[in-house]
Image (cartoon, helix red, strand yellow):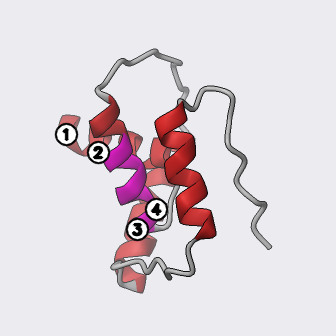
Amino acid sequence: MKPEPKIGKFVDDEERELFEAIEASDAVFKSHLTPTRKKEIMAIAKATMNVERQKITLRISRNDLSRLKSKAMQEGMPYQTLINSILHKAVS
């Protein structure tokens, strides 16, 4: 059983409204990933997790962050994992 996501203290009013609207909705969010592609992405994520990591701070537009979070939700993964995967793919 997955833990319930918590709305963090770093969420602004607009993001909080979006989360609350999604939670109140009866809409079903469906991943467009095939099981094979999901396994590939998870393997990439796990491979990057075994490497020593460096914490960074990154400023991006709210719009881009919202889109990343939405895409990650569609893909069924945490948004930071998606960002890490995108960066890894770009530099590899």
Whether residue 47 is visible to the viewer of this picture, yes or no, is no
Verify CB contact (< 8 Å) between mark 2 and mark 3.
no
Q: Residues within 10 Å of mark 1 (few under 14, many from 20)?
A: few
Q: Distance between the residues labelled 2 and 1?
A: 6 Å
Of the 4 image quadrants, the one containing the C terminus is: top left
Q: Residue at (48%, 63%) from the top-left corner?
A: 42
Check residue 67 for magenta coloring.
yes
Q: Nearer the viewer, residue 75 or 50?
A: 75
Q: Mark 3 points at which residue?
A: 74
Verify CB contact (< 8 Å) between mark 4 and mark 3.
yes
Q: How far apart are marks 4 and 3 (CA)?
A: 4 Å
Q: How crowded is mark 2: few (under 14 residues within 10 Å), some or many (20 or more)?
A: few
Tell me residue 72's x, y (percent): 42, 57
Whether residue 75 is visible to the viewer of this picture, yes or no, is yes
Q: How far apart are marks 4 and 2 (CA)?
A: 15 Å
> Which amino acid type is marked by label 3?
Gln
Q: Mark 2 points at which residue?
A: 86
Tell me residue 39's x, y (percent): 45, 73
Tell me residue 86's x, y (percent): 29, 45
Q: Name the residue under label 1.
A: 90
Number of the label disc, if any, that sits on residue 73: 4
In the rendered image, the vertical position of residue 28 relative to residue 6, given as above or below: below
**Local secondary structure at mark 2:** helix
> Which amino acid type is marked by label 4?
Met
Q: How far apart are marks 1 and 3 (CA)?
A: 21 Å
Q: Nearer the viewer, residue 77 or 85?
A: 77
Q: What is the span of residues highlighted in magenta in the rendered image?
A: 66-75
**Local secondary structure at mark 4:** helix
Q: Residue at (42%, 73%) from the top-left corner?
A: 38
